Image (cartoon, rainbow, N blue to C red):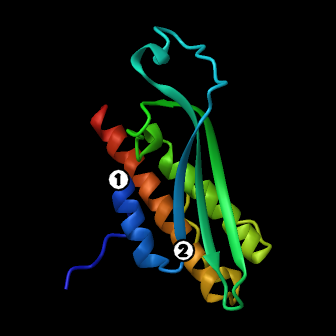
Amino acid sequence: MARARDFAVTPKGILNGLRRVAPYLSVDVTWEPDYGEVWDGDGPDPREEGMVAHTVRVAVEIEDDEGEKFEGDDYLGGVWGVPGEEDPDVHGYFPGMLQQALQELYKNLTGKTAPKTSRKFWDPRGEGPGSEEADQVAEAIKFATRSMHEIYERQRRRFR
């Protein structure tokens, strides 16, 4: 049997990988229109092309054995897109937003701050015994971190 990869490079792949390493975790991405946003960038106003500014929220949730729900989320405002044609990768920000939401979830669940994972992969085994939910969130953080690293490395190799 083939061994599953410990990273993914597309939003769909990342979500599928999370289902494998953290089956009790749910991920929700919502795009809320922000009609008050004003275009301040270079070039023509995106509204002229039928686009609307959005605030995107990536939320992760897990429920413990007693039925208590824990959540973490991350937001990004000023994301322009055509209604109904939202970019699942949130214009490249999805992996980072997911990682931030997972780290917040870990803190809300355990009361501990998840270590920064930008350069080294975090090994939660040194954290002591945890709940099954905390272990799944820790595995999800590792998976998201590896995925972000692989995406970065592929982009770096492409532009050499």
Task: Using the image, determine if residue 136 lies above or below residue 146.
Answer: below
| Quarter of the image where the C terminus is located | top left
Tag 1 secondary structure:
loop
Where, by quadrant of the figure, is residue 69 drawn? bottom right
| Mark 1: amino acid | Thr
Where, by quadrant of the figure, is residue 70 drawn? bottom right
Q: Where does residue 75 sit, x and y in percent of width and height? A: 64, 45
| Mark 2: amino acid | Leu
Going 36% across and 39% down the picture, which residue do you hit?
156
Mark toward the viewer: 1 or 2: 2
Question: For the residues marked 1 and 2, what is the alpha-carbon distance in whole angstroms?
Answer: 18 Å
In this view, which residue lies farthest toward the right? Answer: 111
Going 48% across and 17% down the picture, which residue do you hit?
47
Q: Where does residue 77 sit, x and y in percent of width and height? A: 62, 35
Tag 2 secondary structure:
loop
Q: Where does residue 136 sit, x and y in percent of width and height? A: 55, 79
In this view, which residue lies farthest toward the top? Answer: 43
Q: Which residue is mark 2?
A: 25
| Quarter of the image where the N terminus is located | bottom left
Do labels 1 and 2 touch, CB within 8 Å? no
Question: Is 23 left, or right, of 63 in this rendering?
Answer: left
Going 40% across and 41% down the picture, which residue do you hit?
87
Question: Is 148 left, or right, of 85 in this rendering?
Answer: right
Where, by quadrant of the figure, is residue 106 drawn? bottom right
Q: Neighbour class for label 1 at 10 Å: few (<14), some, many (≥20)?
A: some
Going 50% across and 12% down the picture, which residue do you hit?
45
Q: Where does residue 149 sit, x and y in percent of width and height? A: 44, 53
Task: Using the image, determine if residue 109 lies above or below residue 55.
Answer: below
Q: Which residue is mark 1?
A: 10
